[in-house]
Image: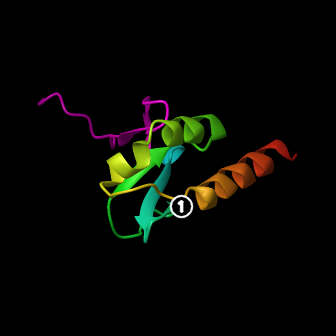
Amino acid sequence: MSGRTHARACPERTCTGCRERAAKRDLLRIVAVEGVCVPDHRGTLPGRGAYVHPASVCLDLAVRRRAFPRALRVQGPLDTADVRRTIEAMAASQAAP
């Protein structure tokens, strides 16, 4: 045998906030659209994407480190209000029974 498995590998990405590697399905993809960070739930928006854990701690770290403009290769600051609202909504839906 060649040593390869027949199971499909789970793609990994790095969170721009905490810099930890995680499965792609566990992270939220962020895309820059006209100076605004937009959450890409389905992963189909065009352009370069950055990944972050859906937690406000990781988002705060990424904003403080100015990681989104660097990861998305855009000039200047990006508005992250939409991403923050999405992450807060996700946390609220998980907390509710």
Q: Residue at x 33, y 47 (%)?
A: 70
From the viewer's perspective, is 64 left or right of 5? right
From the viewer's perspective, is 60 left or right of 49? right
Please provide percent x and percent y for residue 27.
Answer: 51, 45
Mark 1 lies on a secondary structure that is: loop
Is residue 60 rendered magenta in the image? no
Please provide percent x and percent y for residue 80.
Answer: 56, 56
Q: Residue at x 26, y 34 (%)?
A: 5
Is residue 22 rendered magenta in the image? yes
Residue 10 visible in rendering: no
Tag 1: Cα neighbours inside 10 Å, few (<14), some, or many (≥20)? Answer: few
Q: Residue at x 33, y 57 (%)?
A: 75
Q: Quadrant of residue 47?
A: bottom left
* Colour scheme of the picture: rainbow
Q: Main secondary structure of the magenta part?
A: loop
**Which residues are drawn in magenta?**
1-24
| The N terminus: image quadrant | top left
For the residue marked with disc 1, what is the amino acid?
His
Residue at mark 1: 41
Please provide percent x and percent y for residue 26.
Answer: 53, 43
As rendered, which of 14 and 5 lies closer to the eye? Answer: 14
Q: Residue at x 32, y 59 (%)?
A: 48
From the viewer's perspective, is 74 left or right of 86? left
Residue 18 visible in rendering: yes
As rendered, which of 56 and 13 lies closer to the eye? Answer: 56
Question: Compared to 86, does 18 lie above or below?
Answer: above
Please provide percent x and percent y for residue 69.
Answer: 38, 51
As rendered, which of 8 and 54 lies closer to the eye? Answer: 54
